[in-house]
Amino acid sequence: MRIFYDHQIFSLQDAGGASRYFYELARHLGAINGPRLEIGLGLNSSIYPFRKIATANTRIFERRVTLSPGVPRYVVNEIISNIFGFTRGRFDIYHSTLYRTIPLLRRRRTVVTHHDCTHELFPHLFRNAAMIIESKRRLYSAADAVICVSEASRRDLLRFYSVDEERTKVIYHGFAPFVRPINDQNQTCGGSLKYILFVGARGGYKNFMALLEAYATSGAAVDYELVAVGGGEFVAAELEKIKQLGIMKRIRLIPKATDELLAATYKNAALLVYPSLYEGFGFPPLEAMSLGCPVLTANTSSMPEVCGEAAFYFDPTDPAALKFALQRALSDTEGTQRMKDKGYQQVTRFRWERTADETLNVYRRVLE
């Protein structure tokens, strides 16, 4: 079976959930006898070590460059990919990595992965939402199979797009524990002994502003700092909100973190708060659980699927719910320990080996 992954997601990001998904798929499919995988990365600077997974059954076509991810790199790689696709013969499976297909790539069957419906649910947050929605509509209608990363993402797919449910399959992401050494010393936030943690992008539906409000009004700021990791520097609106709430001296920001620093930050946190209004899957809660950090998350979209009984929940549609949930989680010592114990078990449900096996079964089924 010849399988092809294209350049799209790797042209637009050097790191991220979707690019990590395809890297892990490639890494684990390469360990299975039978499939032959070709990945047309083109010009790229991905953080994922594709060259290390190249084998006789996994061929990587790439050139490392300093050209930043974005539209110029995408356009160059699109030209390269069409030439490549025309000359490589016919593939059995073409698994598109984003919202389009390579026109000149010859294939028997097309498989796509549906991650979430953020553009459909929050179009005001994306300047190109209409274009992406139309691209997805064409892609999903032409695909032989649509893999969804959670039941919640499949429900949203069927809500917004005319797709035969028989062509869909839920396959959860896997989870790869941190492998770098973890610094056990609490040096992640300037010497603070106790802190609450937020990880990832903060804008729009990520609901960071609601966390700031709950943190300031719940009394948590008296005993705990709030550490935000990732997502870049604070924007003007965030700084204004922090100043307005009078918590400027209690907020710490780590705009970008290595895996080692992120792991240490999880391990030493009193609680990870993941207040996002919507997630197709969501990795930070699993990352936190794997390192013994209890989790408080919104009870929406895929989060109950991902976190199971191993997290504290709140209703993000209730303005006061996060405040009270934060108070409860920080004061419930027995419940916190119970969530830690359940968290260690919860992360074992998500394995990349299983994700790869189930994905390969989808490829086989569409070829039949």
Image (tube, rainbow, N blue to C red):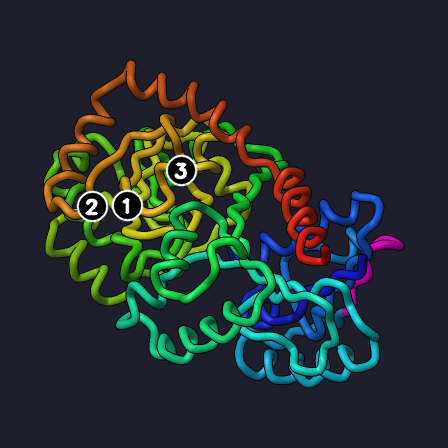
Q: Which residues are magenta?
A: 55-61
Say what amino acid the circle numbered 1 marks.
Pro
Kindly identify the residue that appears in the image at 54 percent across and 57 percent down. Answer: 167
Task: Report crowding for label 1: few under 14, some 14 to 19, many 20 or more residues within 10 A (C-alpha).
Answer: many
Callout 2: SS:
loop
Q: Which residue is mark 1?
A: 275
Task: Report crowding for label 2: few under 14, some 14 to 19, many 20 or more residues within 10 A (C-alpha).
Answer: some
| 147 up-or-down from 269: above or below | below
Quadrant the N terminus occupies: bottom right
Relative placement, left or right, of 221 versus 297 is: left
Cα distance, mark 3 to mark 2? 17 Å
Q: Report which quarter residue 2 is drawn in.
A: bottom right
Kindly identify the residue that appears in the image at 45 percent across and 46 percent down. Answer: 150
Q: Which residue is mark 2?
A: 316
Q: Nearer the viewer, residue 191 or 47?
A: 47
* Residue 132 on image: x %, y %: 43, 75
Say what amino acid the circle numbered 2 marks.
Pro
| 7 up-or-down from 332: above or below | below
Say what amino acid the circle numbered 3 marks.
Glu
Q: Which residue is mark 3?
A: 305
Q: Report which quarter residue 42 is drawn in.
A: bottom right
Cα distance, mark 1 to mark 2? 7 Å
